[in-house]
Amino acid sequence: MSSIWVYQACPYSLALCLITKSTLLTRPGRCWHLWQREKYMRLAYQRFPLTTSQYLRDIEGEPFKPEHSVQPVFTSPPKEGEDPFNTKCLPENLSWVARMKDGVIYVYKDAAEADQHKPIENMPAPHYETFIDDMNFLIALIAQGPTKTYSHRRLKFLMSKFNVHEMLNEMEEMKELKLNPHRDFYNCRKVDTHIHAAACMNQKHLLRFIKKSYRVDADRVVQNIKGKDVTMKELFANLNLHPYDLTVDSLDVHAGRQTFQRFDKFNAKYNPVGASELRDLYMKTENHIDGEYFARIIKEVASDLEDARYQYAEPRLSIYGCKPNEWAKLSGWFNKHRVFSPQLKWMIQVPRIYDIFRGRNFVPHFGKMLENIFMPIFQATIEPHANPELSIFLKHVTGFDSVDDESKHSGHMFCTKSPKPEEWDIVKNPSYSYYIYYMYANITMINQLRKARGMNTFQFRPHCGEAGAVTHLLASFMTADNISHGLNLKKSPVLQYLYFLAQIPIAMSPLSNNSLFLEYAKNPVLEFLKKGLIVSLSTDDPMQFHYTKEPLMEEYAIAAQVFKLSTCDMCEISRNSVLQSGLSDEEKTHFLGADYLKEGPEGNDIRKTNVAQIRMAYRYETLCYELNLIKEGLKTD
Amino acid sequence: MSSIWVYQACPYSLALCLITKSTLLTRPGRCWHLWQREKYMRLAYQRFPLTTSQYLRDIEGEPFKPEHSVQPVFTSPPKEGEDPFNTKCLPENLSWVARMKDGVIYVYKDAAEADQHKPIENMPAPHYETFIDDMNFLIALIAQGPTKTYSHRRLKFLMSKFNVHEMLNEMEEMKELKLNPHRDFYNCRKVDTHIHAAACMNQKHLLRFIKKSYRVDADRVVQNIKGKDVTMKELFANLNLHPYDLTVDSLDVHAGRQTFQRFDKFNAKYNPVGASELRDLYMKTENHIDGEYFARIIKEVASDLEDARYQYAEPRLSIYGCKPNEWAKLSGWFNKHRVFSPQLKWMIQVPRIYDIFRGRNFVPHFGKMLENIFMPIFQATIEPHANPELSIFLKHVTGFDSVDDESKHSGHMFCTKSPKPEEWDIVKNPSYSYYIYYMYANITMINQLRKARGMNTFQFRPHCGEAGAVTHLLASFMTADNISHGLNLKKSPVLQYLYFLAQIPIAMSPLSNNSLFLEYAKNPVLEFLKKGLIVSLSTDDPMQFHYTKEPLMEEYAIAAQVFKLSTCDMCEISRNSVLQSGLSDEEKTHFLGADYLKEGPEGNDIRKTNVAQIRMAYRYETLCYELNLIKEGLKTD
């Protein structure tokens, strides 16, 4: 099936010549920027679109082999009657050794080979100097005038083209959807692709939970301060409040006008009634009651999702890298409370707060923080039976996030002269790119190891482009499977066009942005969607931003109303969210159709996705057209 | 309690002199426009603010007697164990006679007095010529340059004043709310002040209901076409569809981009799958199954509201005036299916479609349509026991609405030369003002009769200012207790300022407007709220506009997000909605506090409303300040 109309040759070949003739891009016969991303994705078992890959091979004059493309591996949901916490099926322990060198953990056959730094073959690390070189190439590229002009024009063209598509085909799309039996926006699957576990309940839910816990557990010991047991009653009495009187106003966890452009105030909203004691009690995995309440809240959220049936979420839990036993505690919590639901896939978020830990002397250098974050995973992967709880938990973890206020400026510039992590012992925080590179490098190594062991792999899905420098988006272009926010793609036409060509999924949270960084009506989500970037909608922090019982539906409803989205738009966003997510191959097949890995209309099963084939054809043709322009441009070069 | 700051004398006295010196306004010693509204409100047992009333008396040099103010009477909710359908407590029958003269129904002691047109004393009708005269005065007023300048400047001042109030007092307001125990936005009462019964369920609810009804009732006879029984199975087969395959897309009742500025297309959306047969079956009170499904759907909606506990709605049911037995059928449906819920108060909407009925020769003239609409109420009020079902139904009816596409232009200009309703036998539709006047006049007469009989009265609450000429808003200023929409107040500063001075409630539906007449971000709801107009939020048609299970919460949530409303703003809107509604005195006392009829902060019980006293003080002072300006201006005149 093809869309109704055909485009004529485009008048922009002049602009195209301008880039291709520039010295930066004429490493001969190669579309350097996309090729770089492809290389880094493949190395880390992350995704790169087949279509773009095929064009790259055409440009390079090499044969395209689909089998060269890689896919991440996610754990399938447990079969009927199977226990997701069963440790019996874990792979056997090996005697391999993991050791960090220059901030990256390598795997060796044994300690002797480790001493000589002879890592196991077939597990190549990203090459540090090449990475910096590649990054500098991209930094120069996005600043280059002709490239900016070209990208800007192509994006403008994509926008107008979609508007024309809409005017011509809107009714046809609607007709397809109307004829599609039994599937509509309500029962097509959607995933909340970006949600922090600590704020995954809405404010009213948290309030109800606190009141209920007090009614039942007032005399329970919930704290131990300097050897003295504190009951819940005493805890609240110390705070001078009674849960019966508590309201969402006094709870004060909702972002308001005061949080706009104030990430610091926003972070304080995580403390109910401004009291970190309550945050500890209700929203932490590690406390005097072993995170029982937090587990229960999450299970209630999961149960609401199970009732809603077509909604999934990927809550993010924190690993700080402050101590080496964080993983053990987190996975202990996960196993003890059996925090599992078929509606949830887990993500790990790592806050970029080395400076705080170093300032308090919790870690000696940045390398130790990386080691605390990643070493336990290597150990559990090598010796699953020695780390059964963590091994089980890791089966359900699908990716890593890097989080913090991006608008905080870091004076550091990541380059070949940057100190290695083990040498980074100053109190200053490394830059965003530095963090991103070392997370990527270690995830790459883990994924190779886990893939070799037949285990699930992890995606890198950082917060990126919510605020701060556009170079953040560049670092993620090289390293991330997909990103959260991406607002700043507005500011760089070149990166925006590259994100389009590489079809990098972006989890957007316009309601979150509205409270923090950008007014709702100015959010670029509609613009990105129209241009063909792969956007999904996510809630970020229902506790702070949403009002209703169904935060994800609220997010979709508001976008639909304010941006006047059509059903096809909304279902396309839902489909994007499933593709972007860490749902397993089995689930994706079930939710999107058996051919979901194919690109273009043949990859779409309208009976499952409710996305019109004409829309899929439009998207596919449009991507091919843009890729072909580059191919032709490089030929004439 | 008074707000923190005090205003200095205002520099606008010059502009003020300009109006008061104009010939139109110098009917000596009287604030003509407000005095007119007061007069018409009092005549019809509708509301006029005490504060404004007091200033008018001051201006006129007359003593203010609060007992002169009138209040509508609404039926209290049934006591524990009391049956709302019990006909035993109806007042006795009288032998009075109701008869229409010049389009208005009068009540006479007996037929002889009726023949001589000697209506019962103490039931004065509005005086037709005076009304036209008053209206012409206002028409001239709103077009007068200096009055426009004055109003515009005052409104601009009100806006800036609120912005200053917000900057100074926002945190103080929040503090009050945080200290207010047990009450927050979620558990303060809110009323959906404008919702059409036929679209009060959301699209997903209707879809589920249709599927369920088919599973249970496929073989039930649901239609009789020319003597032939049609089962539900056959009905769907004739439409070439199977409910199992039905989706919200094929149901096609949701307003989309296609309905913007197209009221005609919007009206077609009331037909599920475009089939009027399904509208008849599921959304009508009168059909082969006696409206059973419609009653069940409404009861499901009511049950959802009962679960939500703090939400109420005032669904509007249609009386067309096409046949005299419409009331009997509607009240028969209401009683048969016992469509009662403490969460619901009923409104009657009268479509302005005389032209259609006349065109098909259903009615001989406009007077007959008015008679069909109003005569049965008079009869049931005079002889309740002869009309028990209607009498019971009327107890639960709280007001009348006048509905249709306001953007349709009517060539007719309402004036003393307009034909009387009984003479209006042409096919052309009368103008909006003509409809409004005759509805108002008849409601006035009914209210006087019912008040005399100790029965509940009715409010006039027309759709007004959604589109079309600004004179609509002028007609409602004279006649309506409160209005729906009011968007066009944007276009007339004078009327907007008068609506502020008279504190006329406006039920606004920005999501409905967004699909039909005005983009969400351009909706004046925030502007009106800031200036001190009495706005409430309402859904209009959840079936067409909303996505979630809680349409009213969706309406509030979206307004809160897009307009960045504070909790105090949202609770003020909620409070406005209760005041505007047809909830009884008993309920309002329970929901707002014992002094809710008092104006200013003393009328507010923060423990029930969660509106900060500082906000109430600000509103009260601001209104007094504006009224005082006028008083002083008239003195210097």
Image: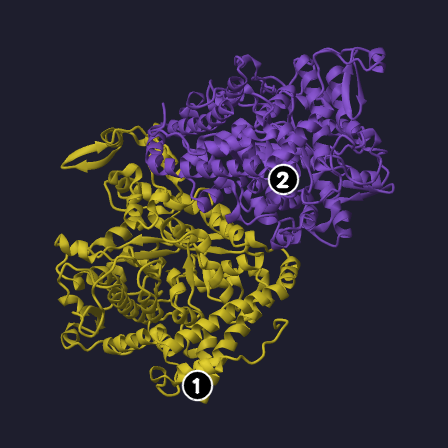
Chain colours: A yellow, B purple
Observer able to see residue A89: no
* A504 horizontally vs A364: left or right: right
Which type of secondary structure does the marked residue at label 2 adopt? loop
Residue at position x 33%, y 65% in the image: A470
Q: Position of residue B590 (x, y in %)?
A: 49, 21
- How far is the residue under mark 1 from the one under mark 2? 62 Å
Front-lying residue, A123 or A403: A403
The kind of secondary structure element at disc 1 is: helix
Q: What residue do we see at 40% from left, 50% from top?
A: A514
Query: According to the image, label 2 marks what residue?
Result: B470
Residue A356 location, x and y as percent? 18, 54
Circle 1 is placed at which residue position?
Answer: A634
Location of residue B89 with respect to A624 vertically, above or below: above
Q: Quick one: A28 or A516, which is closer to the camera?
A: A516
Which chain is indicated by disc 1? Answer: A
Where does residue A508 sit, x and y in percent of width and height? 42, 57
Q: Is residue A486 above or below residue B384?
A: below
Q: Residue at x 42, y 20 (%)?
A: B602
Q: Is residue B320 left or right of residue B252?
A: right
Q: Chain of mark 2?
A: B
Q: Residues within 10 Å of mark 1 (few under 14, many from 20)?
A: many
Kindly indicate the quadrant of the structure image that contains residue B581: top right
* Frontmost residue, A630 versus B71: B71
Q: Give the residue type at disc 2.
A: Val
Which of the labelled discs sits on residue B275, or is there none?
Answer: none
Label 2 neighbour load within 10 Å: few <14, some 14-19, many 20+: many
